Structures are given as structure tokens and as C-alpha cells.
Amino acid sequence: MSKHERWNTLLELLAASGKLEVEEAATTLDVSAATIRRDLDELAEQQLLVRTRGGAVVHGVSYELPLRYKSTRHAPEKRRIAEAVADLVAPGEVVGLNGGTTTTEVARALALRFASGRTEAPGAAVPAGPALTVVTNALNIAGELAVRPQIKIVTTGGVARPQTYELVGPLTVGVLNEVVLDVVVLGVDGVDAELGMMAHQEDEASISRLFAERASRVVVVTDSSKMGRRAFARICGLDRIDLLVTDTGIAPETALQLTEAGVEVLTV
């Protein structure tokens, strides 16, 4: 197991239980206690956890794994979700994307789908415009799509959050207030049948809420592990969501609750 894989596993174990013991982690990962101690020390230096005598605890009240460590979780499900969403986007549309691992996969799927180039107006001899316009507050998504000449990429201003690469704050709000979106694809941290869509951070939730307000269609993308889960900050209620795309692991009763609330559910 590589160091990156060990770190990924340690952070996931920490996120699940809130604390780690060196000996227990060493047994789980089948490595020496000395290796685990070094790993925890290095992770603590990056402020990803807090070292304690004999182990570690989560860093902060609301623990959130940085995006780079979440990218391998439920990867096949996220790719299937992304491909399904990309097929729903029409050429020439303006698409909003917030940050997250699933929306990053959506961005990649869109880039592949529209890789053939620009759309043509009927009877026109020259390209009518970009194949797609993407508005995002996620630095990593903007970086990946900026090299795609067929896609017009619009980024918001704002203050970057290192955990998710998302831009937040008044500058972000200012840009989003000036655009109109055909569809927004939102990644979320929790979906609750009563409270709706949620995020771990209130600043990210407010930007996602504004994305939804600026869009004609709102699509939520999430793997089934987040269904029935609550997070700190509410984005919006189910009444604002047109479509939720998730994997087949969603519980039938949860899917029924969402459908009864007026949300179309697509499982892939």
C-alpha cells in the first residue's frame, strides 16, 4: 500500500469515527505502528487532523475531507452519474457547476461529450458559438476545462477554500448575480427528505443556493451514501430540485419520498 493510499484510508477512518488509535490503525492497514505514527505526524502538519497521545482526532468541529482525498471514494458510481448527466445537456446550453468530486466528474464527462467542437447555426458558414458554456466557482474544474477550446469557461471571483477548491464570498455572489443558467448541476454533502439539500459549510451552501436560483433546471448529483444524511448548512428544499441523479444503492423508500416531493429520481 502506497503512502497516498494509507493517508486516504486513515482520513476516511478518521472521518467515520472521529478518532484514531495508532495500534488499531496499524492492524487495519497491516503496517507497523511506527509507520502510522509518521503518517499521522505528516497529516497533522498539513492540518488534516490533530495528534493526540496514541493517535489522532478530527481537526475542527465539522470535519471535511479535502477534495484530493475524496476523489477515490465511490469512483465508479460517480463516473456513471456524470455520464448520465452529460447526456442530458444540450449543445449551446449554459451549465453551472459547483465544486466537489461528483461535479468534477460531470465536467470531465461534458468535455468528452462536446469534444467534437463548436455548434453550428442552421445554414451558417461559420461557428455560431461555443459547444457549451460552463459557469463554475471551482478552481479545479475551471483548470480542467480551460484547455478545451470548444467550451467557454466562466469562473467566479471569490476566496478559495483549500478543502474543495471552491470560490466563495461576496465576489462570487457578484458574478453569479449577473448570469443566467440553463441548468445547474449541484454536488451536495447530504440529502434529507424533510430538510432538502445540504453542505458542510455555510458559505458553500449559500453559493450553491444562488446557483440554483439562477438556473432554469436544477440537477443534484450524489452517490447513494449521502442519501438520508444531514449536514450543517441547508442549500435548498426539495421543491427547488428538478432531478436527482444517483446510483442504484439508494433505498427504495428514500426514492419514493423524493418522488412524492416532486423530485424526479434517476438511478444509474
Image: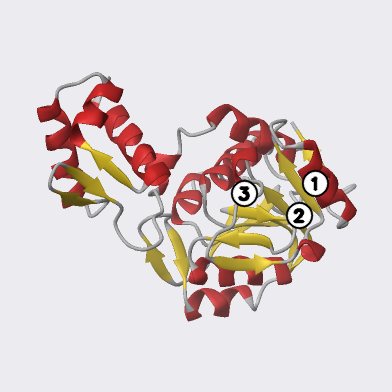
> Mark 1 and 3 residues: CB-CB less than 8 Å, in contact?
no
- Residue at position x 16%, y 43% from top? 42
Reading the image, the residue beneath label 3 is 151
Q: Is residue 268 left or right of residue 10?
A: right
Looking at the rendered structure, the kind of residue marked 1 is Ala
Q: CA distance from mark 2 to mark 1?
A: 6 Å
Marks 2 and 3, the one that precedes in the sequence:
2
* Label 3 residue SS: strand
- State the residue in front, 118 or 61: 61
Reading the image, the residue beneath label 2 is 93
Q: At which x and y percent is residue 69? A: 38, 40
The answer to whether one can see residue 268 in this image is yes
Q: CA distance from mark 1 to mark 3?
A: 13 Å
Q: At which x and y percent is residue 2? A: 26, 23
Q: Is residue 149 left or right of residue 248?
A: left
Reading the image, the residue beneath label 1 is 90
Looking at the rendered structure, the kind of residue marked 3 is Ile
> Mark 2 and 3 residues: CB-CB less than 8 Å, in contact?
no
Circle 3 Cα neighbour tier, 10 Å, few/some/many (<14 / 14–19 / ≥20): many
- Residue at position x 46%, y 66% from top? 167
Q: Is residue 170 left or right of residue 22?
A: right
> Mark 2 and 1 residues: CB-CB less than 8 Å, in contact?
yes
Marks 1 and 3, the one that precedes in the sequence:
1
Q: Nearer the viewer, mark 2 or mark 3?
A: 2
Circle 1 Cα neighbour tier, 10 Å, few/some/many (<14 / 14–19 / ≥20): some
In this view, 31 is above or below 205:
above
* Label 2 residue SS: loop
